[in-house]
């Protein structure tokens, strides 16, 4: 019996140890630690208009940028009624070639519109005297620049043969939002793009008014004016063109395919005096 007790004690110890091993919980698959994965990069959510607000719209490009510029991308711009910095054209001519005031860009109505708009008040001559534009013309700057150069370089020498110097250019029409020849539904006029001016003549220092369409005025003078404007501008319409320009001259800088230019102005001679029929005799049956 003395030898059996130690053996029984040993067996008891092993039995208790096995019971403890079986009693410990086995970690489930759900509780096992998972390998950490790289955090997913969040993608920005697409911007959506807030309730009650309109979706943003891209401002339309004024037609002027396509109608008159050799490179439409150069001065495309959008109309802005706020303050605008002077353009390169305005810096180039202000106080040197012309007296101008910067104006807000024009946008509408309809297809009418222009960027880089100025109010042309006078042309500055090389001797610093001024030729007024009466009334002041609303034009895009490049058109105002071409008009000023024409007055300085072409018109002034031409009027010298009339015994005077130019004092004021008669402005019949500049910016005007309308169709061509004021016809409803017609294609937009260059006047509606601030790219045209109509002139009737020039007031001289000797008090004379030189009407460009006056048949009684020197033909040599009128022919010199016609040649100069047709060389400098891309569209010229005057007497004999379309029936709408018999008393004034239209000038613009519209650009056409292949550099096509339109010069339609007939310098007309004075009308011949047509003798009136003799009065009918009283005794005639």
Image (cartoon, rainbow, N blue to C red):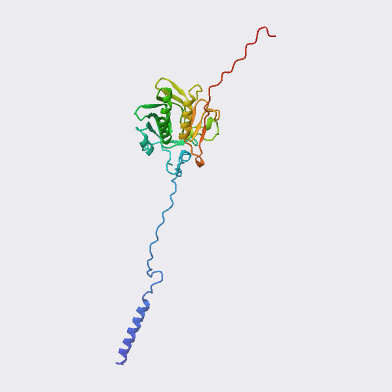
Q: Nearer the viewer, residue 148 or 35?
A: 148
Q: Nearer the viewer, residue 249 or 48?
A: 249
Q: Position of residue 74 (x, y in %)?
A: 42, 43
The image quadrant where one finds the C terminus is top right
Q: Nearer the viewer, residue 46 or 119?
A: 119
Q: Position of residue 274 (x, y in %)?
A: 58, 18
Image position of 190 (left or right of 104) = right
Image position of 9 (left or right of 240) = left
- The answer to whether 120 is drawn above or below residue 163 in the figure is below
User: Residue at (47%, 34%) from the top-left corner?
Assistant: 231
User: For the view shown, which residue lies furthest in the top direction?
Assistant: 283
- How many labels sit on residues? 0
Q: Nearer the viewer, residue 244 or 229?
A: 229
Q: Position of residue 187 (x, y in %)?
A: 53, 35
Image position of 177 (left or right of 7) = right
User: Residue at (41%, 30%) from the top-left corner?
Assistant: 151
Quadrant of res 28 = bottom left
- The answer to whether 272 is drawn above or below residue 181 in the figure is above
Q: Position of residue 132 (x, y in %)?
A: 39, 26
């Amino acid at each position: 019996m003395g030898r059996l007790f130690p053996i029984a004690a040993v067996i008891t110890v092993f039995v208790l140890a096995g019971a403890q091993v079986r009693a410990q919980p086995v970690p489930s698959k759900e509780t096992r630690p998972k390998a950490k994965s790289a955090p997913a990069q969040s993608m920005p959510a697409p911007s959506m208009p807030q309730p009650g607000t309109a979706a943003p719209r891209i401002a339309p490009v004024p037609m002027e940028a396509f109608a008159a510029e050799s490179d439409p991308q150069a001065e495309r711009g959008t109309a802005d009624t706020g303050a605008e910095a002077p353009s390169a054209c305005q810096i180039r001519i202000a106080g040197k070639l012309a007296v101008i005031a910067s104006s807000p860009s024009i946008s509408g109505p309809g297809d009418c519109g222009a960027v880089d708009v100025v109010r042309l008040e006078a042309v500055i001559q090389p001797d610093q005297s001024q030729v007024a534009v009466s009334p002041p013309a609303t034009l895009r700057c490049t058109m105002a620049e071409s008009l000023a150069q024409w007055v300085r370089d072409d018109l002034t020498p031409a009027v010298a043969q009339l015994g005077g110097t130019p004092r004021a250019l008669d402005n019949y029409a500049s910016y005007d939002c309308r169709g061509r020849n004021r016809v409803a539904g017609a294609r937009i006029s260059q006047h509606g793009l601030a790219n045209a001016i109509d002139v009737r003549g020039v007031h001289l220092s000797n008090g004379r008014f030189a009407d460009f369409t006056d048949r009684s005025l020197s033909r040599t003078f009128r022919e010199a004016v016609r040649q100069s404007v047709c060389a400098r501008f891309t569209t010229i319409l005057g007497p004999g063109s379309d029936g709408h320009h018999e008393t004034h001259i239209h000038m613009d800088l519209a650009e056409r395919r292949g550099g096509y230019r339109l010069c339609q102005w007939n310098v007309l001679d004075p009308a011949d005096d047509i003798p009136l029929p003799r009065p009918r005799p009283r005794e005639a049956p």
